[in-house]
Image (cartoon, rainbow, N blue to C red):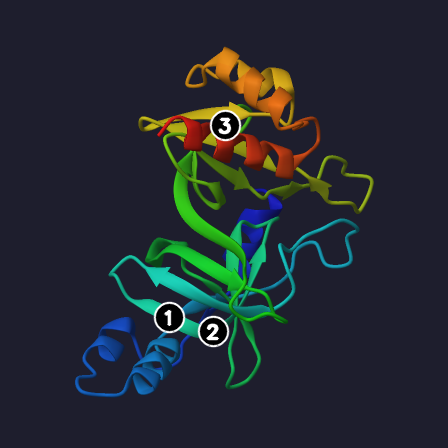
Amino acid sequence: MNMKNILFTISFCLITGLSFSQALTCIGSSDEDYQARLQAGLIGIEYMNPVKDYAGIQYFSNWTQGEVFLEDGDVIRNITLRYDQYLDQLLWLRKTDYRTGILSKSAVIGFKLFNPVFGKEVLGSFVKMDIHLPGLDSASAYVQVLSTGNISLYAYRNANIISTHEYVLNDNTRYIIVSGGNQYPLALRRHSLINLPVVEKTAMKTILRSEGITISKNEEGLIKAIKVYNEKKR
């Protein structure tokens, strides 16, 4: 049993006394009251960090305000969130006692994290997706939306441990192109981009040259290339 499975085995539920179904029966309450009831109805697993004090980047950001989009169509707003890249789990800081819980991935379809300084600026928008990547078992994971269009670009913000002798987390971010319902893994390399089966090689080469875009180890360059390509293909 690996470390992640052990974590879930020894974790215990944070039961707040209300379920989602009870929160949804609130009729005629204000939006503020409704949001409070939704948050009160959250049921999660208490978070215990399995890689505490490891070097490397474990979280996508510090604690910040966000929105959680639920499978049943509800949206929970003004909730304090953090995304753990090692566990691929959405963390929630409960206001009543400041305990940290893991929100059930089965109930969530996506979430947004906002800039703690500029509240309306989105730090990251994530959706839940069944991903298929080389070297990884197919799994339901949170992926960050980087660009959408005829071809859409997503990032799986993963951190992993590559050595059992060092307490270090490795950045294992993986990029995924989705087009026509199919997924294509993508590396931060020019060759990988222009050889995608859903990309016209000549058109992409022209964009990279005319826009002066470099792709190697350059996520912003990759995002720009995809955005410009989609605009020209409208």
Label 1 is placed on what type of residue? Ile
Spot occupied by residue 38 in the image (x, y as percentages of width and height): 33, 76
Q: Which mark is residue 76?
A: 1
Q: Can residue 137 be seen from the camera position used here?
A: no
Classed neighbour count for the residue bearing mark 1: other residues with Cα under 10 Å, few (<14), some (14–19), many (≥20): some
Q: Residue at x 28, y 72 (%)?
A: 20
Classed neighbour count for the residue bearing mark 2: other residues with Cα under 10 Å, few (<14), some (14–19), many (≥20): many
Spot occupied by residue 226 in the image (x, y as percentages of width and height): 50, 31
Q: Residue at x 55, y 84 (%)?
A: 97
Q: Horizontally, is 210 left or right of 120 in the view?
A: right
| Residue that carries the numbered disc 2 in the rendered image | 79
Q: Disc 2, disc 1: CB below 8 Å?
A: yes
| Residue that carries the numbered disc 3 in the rendered image | 133
Along the viewing direction, whichever of 27 and 25 lies nearer the viewer: 27
Location of residue 64 by image quarter = bottom right
Location of residue 183 by image quarter = top left
Earlier sequence position, callout 3 versus callout 1:
1
Q: CA distance from mark 2 to mark 1?
A: 7 Å
Q: CA distance from mark 3 to mark 1?
A: 31 Å
Say if 15 sits above or below 173 in the image: below
Q: Which mark is residue 54?
A: none
Label 3 is placed on what type of residue? Leu
